[in-house]
Image: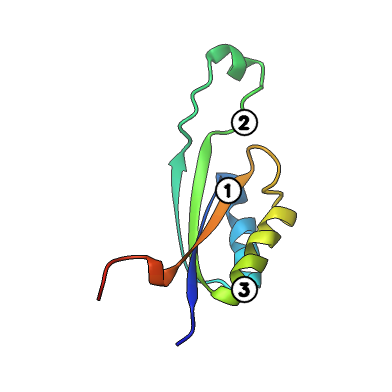
Amino acid sequence: MQELEFIITIGNRNDGKAISSTLEKAGGFCFNSFFGKGIVRASEILQALGLVTNQSKIVITCIIEKEKACTALKLLETVNHFTKPNTGIAFAIPLNKMGGNA
């Protein structure tokens, strides 16, 4: 049986298509996405000065073969700049670790 991983990404809403494209190119499938809002609250002064980025977020999940998961995460770092602040975060969870005993 092939080992699979569940990738979860959280990024800026406007980057949703680019994030999905990167994951698809890496071999991801069975995508799901939904919108959310960050929990960081900025003062009105910071917002007026333009020092706060858009707080709208998108959560994108997919399933990927275990061998391709590391490549997908590295692509998110390089292609989608996830190493820069306020761009995104991603992680993978082995699917055999999710849920209980069946």
Q: Give the foreground label among 2 and 1.
A: 1
Neighbor class of circle 2 (other Cα within 10 Å; few <14, some 14-19, many 20+) is few
Q: Residue at x 63, y 60 (%)?
A: 73
Q: Looking at the rendered structure, which numbered label has been put on residue 53?
A: 2
Q: Are marks 2 and 3 in contact (CB under 8 Å)?
A: no
The answer to whether marks 1 and 3 mark residues whose Cβ atoms lie closer than 8 Å is no
| Residue 90 placement (x, y as % from top left) | 56, 53
- Answer with mark 2 or mark 1, whichever residue precedes in sequence: 2
N-terminal-most mark, 1 or 3: 3
> Dot 3, crowdedness within 10 Å: few (<14), some or many (≥20)?
some
Reading the image, the residue beneath label 3 is 68
What's under tag 1, amino acid-wise? Ile
Q: Nearer the viewer, residue 1 or 37?
A: 1
13 in relation to 79, above or below: above
Q: Label 1: few (<14), some or many (≥20) within 10 Å?
A: some
- Kindly state the secondary structure of the residue where label 2 is placed: loop
Q: Which mark is residue 101?
A: none
User: Residue drawn 58% across and 33% down?
Assistant: 54
Q: Is residue 50 above or below residue 73?
A: above
Q: Residue at 44%, 42% (x, y): give it.
A: 36
Q: CA distance from mark 1 to mark 3?
A: 18 Å
Q: What's the distance in space between the residues labelled 2 and 1, CA to CA?
A: 16 Å
**Furthest-left residue in this view:** 102
State which quadrant residue 100 falls in.
Answer: bottom left
The residue singled out by tag 1 in the image is 89
Instruction: Say which of marks 2 and 3 sits in front.
Output: 3
Residue 96 position within the rendered picture, expressed as x and y whole percent measured from the top left: 40, 72
Q: Position of residue 23 (x, y in %)?
A: 60, 65
**Is 27 placed above or below 45 here?**
below
